[in-house]
Image (spheres, rainbow, N blue to C red):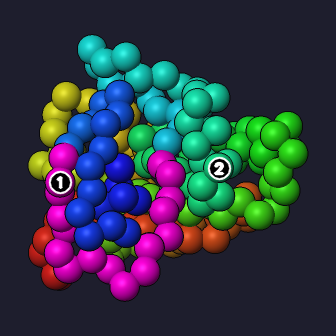
Amino acid sequence: AVTLLLTQPNASYEGRYYQFEDVTIDPRPPRMPDMWVSGGSRVPDPGEHDVPVIAKSVMNRIVRAGKWLSRCSGTREWVKRDWGLLREHARSLGKDPDALLFGHCNFVHLTETTDSARAIEECKGPFLRTMGTHRSWDHLQECYMVGTIDSINAQIEDLVGAGMEYIVLGPVTDDPA
């Protein structure tokens, strides 16, 4: 559906989840942008049906697209595990796993302190304001990039070492300081 909207002057679509008729996006991009597929293991939210594994249907879409943007709602270890599973899945489908691109999306709050405990405490308020309180602070720390700048850099380097080539970091505050 998105491909049609971005490439056709007037598009109609009838799918399982989305339907539309004679829709136009203007201005359309001069060329089709790269499409990344997100997904992966997720630390279950209280009262939700999230699962700590990556679904085969999601892996199929990611391998077909060739670009994976891992979700930030799993642990870093799960992201690395999912990357390994995606590479194995690509091989099983006769695709070159080295042709897959690995990007990661996460949220961050930077502090100027080099004291780990203090940095974590300074991150707590902005994260809870942005993410809400339906998940515990421990849960948020499992999923998001929390800590000193050196700690966050080490978390990023760990993902780079696993094969990550791109990262998208979203600050949890709009305060430029």
User: Dot 1: few (<14), some (14–19), or many (≥20) neighbours within 10 Å?
Assistant: few
Residue type for callout 2: Arg
Percent x, y for residue 124? 24, 50
Location of residue 9 with respect to 90 vertically, above or below: below
Q: Earlier in the sequence, mark 1 or mark 2?
A: 1
Distance from disc 1 to disc 2, alpha carbons, whole Å, reads 28 Å
Percent x, y for residue 35? 48, 62
Location of residue 79 with respect to 46 vertically, above or below: below
Q: Is residue 103 left or right of residue 28?
A: right
SS category of the residue bearing label 2: helix
Q: Residue at x 53, y 26 (%)?
A: 52
Task: Name the residue beneath numbered marker 1.
Answer: 22
Outermost residue on the bottom side: it is: 30
The part of the image, by quadrant, that contains residue 171 is bottom left
Residue 64 bears which disc, if any? 2
Q: Is residue 78 visible?
A: no
Q: Residue at x 40, y 59 (%)?
A: 3
Tell which of 72 and 113 is nearer to you: 72
Please check the rendered image and state whether residue 86 is part of the magenta-colored stretch, yes or no.
no
User: Dot 2: few (<14), some (14–19), or many (≥20) neighbours within 10 Å?
Assistant: some
Please check the rendered image and state whether residue 22 is part of the magenta-colored stretch, yes or no.
yes
Q: Quadrant of the C terminus?
A: bottom left
Q: Is residue 59 visible?
A: yes
Residue type for callout 1: Asp
Q: Residue at x 82, y 51 (%)?
A: 95
- Span of residues in magenta: 21-38
Q: Is residue 171 left or right of residue 105?
A: left
Q: Nearer the viewer, mark 1 or mark 2?
A: 1
- How many marks on residues? 2
Classified by dominant secondary structure, the portion drawn in magenta counts as loop
Tell which of 16 and 75 is nearer to you: 16
